[in-house]
């Protein structure tokens, strides 16, 4: 990448200035580079002169001039360097470097933009983890999109990634689920059966009961109530879990592992992990309960592991689950949780540290809420059921691509306004349509070329020096940014940077297309601009691929 080459050039200049100009440096730092907001400030800028001012006891402007004078530009990588107050050094890259970007895109194709920062480290990303007692809501959909795209980013950065769904299939919620289905089952078969006071009220419970009757009739009607509850809990649990899987597949999300909480209880893993913590001296008994000393690791109070009645807490199960993750060899563990879990973060990190693992190896991303709108007005209920709008209904109405893309347009620490009508419109107001249309437009141009047999589109053969207008060079510079965006998105855990980049690239392409006639009587210019179009199509395809969104060839 240009950034890496520039860093080496600056470091070499610092070393040369140290030896030849007496710049008082004890060691050569790695300079920070950033892209200036204004393009008239160059392609890259560094503040290294200001950083070194205190160490060298020299004015930043003086250091900046010494560094620029020592730069070795024999490869003609840099077109121009300027020093601006209070000591920034701005670099303008030579066009020949930008043309190499087009050649690299042609050579690397689908792999262009990948970065090698993971070194094969094993990463587990746990996300969605909806309770298997009902349909998924819109929030689950956002966490599914974020988790899946984050996994794509890690894979594109040379990590070994496992996508995992944690099934909360243990405890009172599951018992109440079984009781609710049992009551609806009996009612549908004509009994005057009372419904549990805190039972699950949704119509989906009636639908599950109806499916059981359709498949197996009244064979469970005369079972004792406790047995009935257990049978229906198992049957309904499988139905809901299968439904969750199907909805996620509709959204393009496929998990590598489905991990059951109930298995932690049945296997004795919870007792084992408490025993491990006890040996380390972090467990004590008080008021008949068993506690973990999470305050020893920065939590605001200690937490209960086993209640007075002998039942392990959800926290205890979660500790056992994370112990299992580490035992499977994951060096980095990322959990994506709902907004209501914010207060749970510190105790979980404390537990990880108590187990003897690096607390920084556990990252928890809190997914904020989704505000569902229709034409700017809040949507509270489903038109079909009169209850909450489910994720499946949303996908069915607006499609997978719009669902995924719009969930990813904001940072995870911000809520998302999802307008159903915008998601369905075929206009520039709809960001996913805007980006996909840019890809489809380029495909249309290239189809026309193929049909008319207008030359060969090859970055190796075309005269790329002809691409010297402001609009052409702006587009190449935007293509060159893709690898940086991928690296920033994965290191900052920020998939939304991909949607911002995709829209920006589509915008720059549309400007180029408006200002520059792609196919003309000038065959050499036509070939060069077709190479630029082809490269843009490739990067649009690559970024949409990371987002899990289709790159259509026609619209």
Image (cartoon, helix red, strand yellow):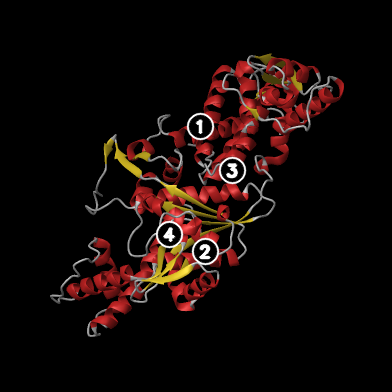
Q: Secondary structure at mark 1?
A: helix
Q: Residue at x 15, y 73 (%)?
A: 194
Q: Is residue 243 left or right of residue 479?
A: left
Of badges 3 and 4, the one in the foreground is: 3
Q: Disc 3 to disc 2, how far (Cα)?
A: 22 Å
Along the line of sight, which residue is nearer the eye, 528 or 185? 185
Q: Is residue 523 left or right of residue 353?
A: right
Numbered label attached to residue 322: 2
Pointers 3 and 4 in contact (C-beta within 8 Å): no
Q: Disc 1 to disc 2, how far (Cα)?
A: 38 Å
Residue corresponding to mark 1: 503
First reached walking from the N terminus: tag 3 or tag 4:
4
Pointers 4 and 1 in contact (C-beta within 8 Å): no
Q: Disc 4 to disc 2, how far (Cα)?
A: 14 Å
Q: Inspect this view and state whether residue 29 appears.
A: yes
Q: Disc 4 to disc 1, how far (Cα)?
A: 31 Å
**Residue 537 image point, x, y percent:** 60, 34
First reached walking from the N terminus: tag 4 or tag 2:
4
Pointers 1 and 2 in contact (C-beta within 8 Å): no
**Residue 466 image point, x, y percent:** 71, 18
Residue corresponding to mark 3: 491
Residue corresponding to mark 4: 129
- Give the number of marks: 4
Quick one: label 4, few (<14), some, or many (20+) residues within 10 Å?
many
Of badges 4 and 1, the one in the foreground is: 4
**Residue 387 image point, x, y percent:** 24, 53
- The residue most toward the right is 20
């Amino acid at each position: 990448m240009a950034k890496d080459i520039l860093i080496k050039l600056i470091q070499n200049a610092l070393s040369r200035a140290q030896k030849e100009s007496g710049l008082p440096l004890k060691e050569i730092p790695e300079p920070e580079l950033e892209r200036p907001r204004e393009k008239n400030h160059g392609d890259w800028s560094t503040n290294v002169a200001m950083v070194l001012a205190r160490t060298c006891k020299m004015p930043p402007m003086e250091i900046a001039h010494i560094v620029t004078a020592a730069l070795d530009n024999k490869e003609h990588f840099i077109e121009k360097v300027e020093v601006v107050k209070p000591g920034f050094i701005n670099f303008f890259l030579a066009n020949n470097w930008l043309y190499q970007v087009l050649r690299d895109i042609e050579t690397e194709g689908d792999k262009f933009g990948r970065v090698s920062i993971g070194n094969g480290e094993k990463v587990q990303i746990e996300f969605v983890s909806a309770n298997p007692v009902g349909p998924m809501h819109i929030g689950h959909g956002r966490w599914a999109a974020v988790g899946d795209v984050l996994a794509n980013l890690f894979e594109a950065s040379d990590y070994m990634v496992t996508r995992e769904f944690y099934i909360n299939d243990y405890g009172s919620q599951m018992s109440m689920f079984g009781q609710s289905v049992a009551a609806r089952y009996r009612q549908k078969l004509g009994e005057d059966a009372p419904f549990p006071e805190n039972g699950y009220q949704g119509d989906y419970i009636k639908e599950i009961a109806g499916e059981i009757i359709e498949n197996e009739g009244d064979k469970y009607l005369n079972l004792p109530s406790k047995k009935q509850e257990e049978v229906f809990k198992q049957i309904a649990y499988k139905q809901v879990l299968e439904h969750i899987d199907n909805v996620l597949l509709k959204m393009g999300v496929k998990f590598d592992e489905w991990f059951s909480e109930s298995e932690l209880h049945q296997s004795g893993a919870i007792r084992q992990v408490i025993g491990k913590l006890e040996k380390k001296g972090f467990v004590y008994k008080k008021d008949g309960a068993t506690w973990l000393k999470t305050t020893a690791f920065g939590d605001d109070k200690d937490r209960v592991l086993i209640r007075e009645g002998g039942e392990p807490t959800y926290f205890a199960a979660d500790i056992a689950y994370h112990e299992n993750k580490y035992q499977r060899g994951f060096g980095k563990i990322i959990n994506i949780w709902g907004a209501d879990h914010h207060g749970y973060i510190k105790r979980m990190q404390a537990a990880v540290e108590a187990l003897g693992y690096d607390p920084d190896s556990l990252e928890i991303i809190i997914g904020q809420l989704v505000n569902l709108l229709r034409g700017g007005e809040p949507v509270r209920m489903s038109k079909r059921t009169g209850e909450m709008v489910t994720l499946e209904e949303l996908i069915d109405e607006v499609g997978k691509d719009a669902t995924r893309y719009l969930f990813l347009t904001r940072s995870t620490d911000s809520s998302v306004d999802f307008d159903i009508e915008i998601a369905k419109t075929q206009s520039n107001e709809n960001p996913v349509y805007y980006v996909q249309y840019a890809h489809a437009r380029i495909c249309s141009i290239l189809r026309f070329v193929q049909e008319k047999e207008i030359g060969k589109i090859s970055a190796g053969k075309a005269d790329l020096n002809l691409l010297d207008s402001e609009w052409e060079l702006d587009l190449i510079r935007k293509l060159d940014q893709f690898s940086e965006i991928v690296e920033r998105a994965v290191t900052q855990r920020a998939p939304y940077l991909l949607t911002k980049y995709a829209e920006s690239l589509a915008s720059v392409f549309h400007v180029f297309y408006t200002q520059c006639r792609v196919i003309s009587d000038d065959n050499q210019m036509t070939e060069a601009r077709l190479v630029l179009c082809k490269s843009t199509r490739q990067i649009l395809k690559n970024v949409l691929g990371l987002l899990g969104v289709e790159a259509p060839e026609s619209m």
